[in-house]
Image (cartoon, rainbow, N blue to C red):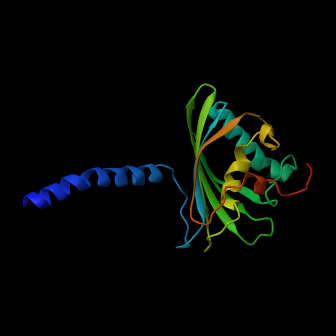
Amino acid sequence: LTNLQRMSTVALEPVMMLILAAVSAAAAVKCPGSPAPIHAQITLSATASASCSDVIAEIKARVDGQASGTWHDPHNNGKYSILSAAESELDLSRVTGNGKYTDKQVLTFSGTGSSCTIEGCSQSQVTSVADMSTNYCDLRMLYCGSADGCKPVAHDFAVTEDSLKPSIGAGTDKSACLKTDLVV
């Protein structure tokens, strides 16, 4: 290599390291995948003031509460289903209230004591860009507490959203999440 080539390689190393770090950080949140080549999605990280077992129990109680009438999805009355559940991960599906669209979610949980980090990803399963905050709301409605205007079923806890990373066109409007007048 010539001196100029060596200097160019050395100058690019920090840039390449930053790019690799950004790609690694973005890839750290597990996503369900989508058959649509262009689709809206969001990844997020949040911290709940509760044990992970309580956070998981609350999410399961909300999903189960749809059938018993103890909970409904306040974002246009969607219908959640748990596809699989492990000790620190839930894989879900949500069909819109009108039955036309499906999104899939993966939530992972880590923490100790009364603090739980929630990492989530929601992806549209059809071609979409502008989602009017639907993927964000798909996740938020599963963990938000009464302080956020939500209706917990088994455990009420405070949540801080630490990071929101929507795809281009996907929204993060909290007010869009509370859109039904259905009372339970």
Q: Quadrant of the N terminus?
A: bottom left
Q: Is residue 178 left or right of residue 53?
A: right
Q: Nearer the viewer, residue 155 or 49?
A: 49
- The percent coordinates of residue 167 (x first, y second) are 56, 62
Q: Is residue 117 left or right of residue 60?
A: left
Q: Nearer the viewer, residue 70 or 111?
A: 111
Q: Is residue 109 above or below residue 181?
A: above
Q: Nearer the viewer, residue 171 or 119?
A: 171
Of all residues, the one furthest to the left in this rendering is 2
- The percent coordinates of residue 35 (x first, y second) are 55, 71
Q: Is residue 130 above or below residue 10?
A: below
- How many numbered callouts? 0
Q: Is residue 128 above or below residue 184?
A: below
| Residue for point 74% across, 49% down | 141
- The percent coordinates of residue 41 (x first, y second) are 59, 61
Q: Quadrant of residue 182?
A: bottom right
Q: Is residue 147 above or below residue 171?
A: above
| Residue for point 64% across, 30% down | 51
- The percent coordinates of residue 111 (x first, y second) are 56, 32
Q: Is residue 86 left or right of residue 59?
A: left
| Residue for point 86% across, 46% down | 70
